[in-house]
């Protein structure tokens, strides 16, 4: 994954992140700071490294050379990875509030007309369901992003908090966990956003909303396939609707796109980066950071998706 950071206010110079070492967005990296002295645990045979973040914690799992696995073993290691992270959170009395998933060879054809992304979704569903107990786990899912990167490893990163957040859905979109079988044997397991019980502080501002990877999707359908400008417009509408929904749940004043303080935008081709910067930077009047990452997007025809961190005005 390659990233370019652009300041909406100051048009800061671009910088490139390592394609083969997926990293979380800038606001998470700022929270991490120099906290590199975490402990490595082995759960279900997978290494899990935990780095202290004060009241928050961050953990990640890397399954090496996962790109070379066939569909069935890949689904199994995905399930094991999620079970491991959920078990670790439980053991530390923490709750997952945000996942980032980096899937190698994301668009590779799989069985039944699906792709590697749908195999990943099935494994993720297996992992959540295995630890769900009797309740419907889909109603309590944290927010998430899932993109492809150009390395061979499968990487899952998770932000943990002392208390669970509140899942928030976008009224313009079908909840992902209710997608039809057009999008895989088992549906994606994430909410469109998470309202945090305790805010994270980024650039001196308390932020309570974590927004999932958001694209040109209405209901459950891709709209404007292969049309970048139209997809950017629909994505802006979706991001605005999610901010309003978070405000309604959180009791704060929703300022729409003005709520966003940090954005990461994934694009399928580096040639789209300039168009994203031109469109997104002026659309978010209080944005502090815009990061553009080159990554494979989960659906055929989608050229980009965006995720973000937002604040609520009291």
Image (cartoon, rainbow, N blue to C red):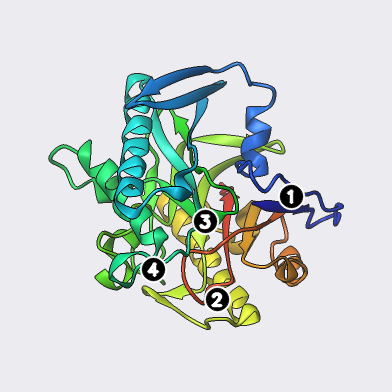
Dot placed on the residue nearer the N-terminal end, 3 or 4: 3
Where residue 278 sits, quadrant-wise, is: bottom right
Task: Estimate the spatial distance between the alpha carbons at disc 3 and disc 4, rounded to whole Å.
Answer: 23 Å
Viewer-nearest of discs 2 and 4: 2
Q: Against 38, is 45 above or below?
A: below
Q: Is residue 227 left or right of residue 88?
A: right
Task: Estimate the spatial distance between the alpha carbons at disc 1 and disc 4, rounded to whole Å.
Answer: 27 Å
Local SS, label 3? strand
10 Å crowding of disc 1: few (<14), some (14-19), many (20+): some
Task: Estimate the spatial distance between the alpha carbons at disc 1 and disc 3, rounded to whole Å.
Answer: 23 Å
Where residue 130 sits, quadrant-wise, is: top left
Residue found 48% across the figure and 81% down from its top: 223
Residue found 62% across the figure and 66% down from its top: 268
x%, y% of residue 40? 49, 19
In the picture of the structure, the residue carrying the numbered disc 4 is 171
Check residue 102 in the rendering and tell me which mark sits there, or answer none.
none
Residue 91 visible in image: yes
Viewer-nearest of discs 3 and 2: 3
In the picture of the structure, the residue carrying the numbered disc 1 is 288
Local SS, label 1? loop
Dot placed on the residue nearer the N-terminal end, 3 or 2: 3
Local SS, label 2? helix
Local SS, label 4? loop
x%, y% of residue 260? 63, 54
Check residue 147 in the rendering and tell me which mark sits there, or answer none.
3
Q: Are marks 1 and 2 in contact (CB under 8 Å)?
A: no
In the picture of the structure, the residue carrying the numbered disc 2 is 234
């Amino acid at each position: 994954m390659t990233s370019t950071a652009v300041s909406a206010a100051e048009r800061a110079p671009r910088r490139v992140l390592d394609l083969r070492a997926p990293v979380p967005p800038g606001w998470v990296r700022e929270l991490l700071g120099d906290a590199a002295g975490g402990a490595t645990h082995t759960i279900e045979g997978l290494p899990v490294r935990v780095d202290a973040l004060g009241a928050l914690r961050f953990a990640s799992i890397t399954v090496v050379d996962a790109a070379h696995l066939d569909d069935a073993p890949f689904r199994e290691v995905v399930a094991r990875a999620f079970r491991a992270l959920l078990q670790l959170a439980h053991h530390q009395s923490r709750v997952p509030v945000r996942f980032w998933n980096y899937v190698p060879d994301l668009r590779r054809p799989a069985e039944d007309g699906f792709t590697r992304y749908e195999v990943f979704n099935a494994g993720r569903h297996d992992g959540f369901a295995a630890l769900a107990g009797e309740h419907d786990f889909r109603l309590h899912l944290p927010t998430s992003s899932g993109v492809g990167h150009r390395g061979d490893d499968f990487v899952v990163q998770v932000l943990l908090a002392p208390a669970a957040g509140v899942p928030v859905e976008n009224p313009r979109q079908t909840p992902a966990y209710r997608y039809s079988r057009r999008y895989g044997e088992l549906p994606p397991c994430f909410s469109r956003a998470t309202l945090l019980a305790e805010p994270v502080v980024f650039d001196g501002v308390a932020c309570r909303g974590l927004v999932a990877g958001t694209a040109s999707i209405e209901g459950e359908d891709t709209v404007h396939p292969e049309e970048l400008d139209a997809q950017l417009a629909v994505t802006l509408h979706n991001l605005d609707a999610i901010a309003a929904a978070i405000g309604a749940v959180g009791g704060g004043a929703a300022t729409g796109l003005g709520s966003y303080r940090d954005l990461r935008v994934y694009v399928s081709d580096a040639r789209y980066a300039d168009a994203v910067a031109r469109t997104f930077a002026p659309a978010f009047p209080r944005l502090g950071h815009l990061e553009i990452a080159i990554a494979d997007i989960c659906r055929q025809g989608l050229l980009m998706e965006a995720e973000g961190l937002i604040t609520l005005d009291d």
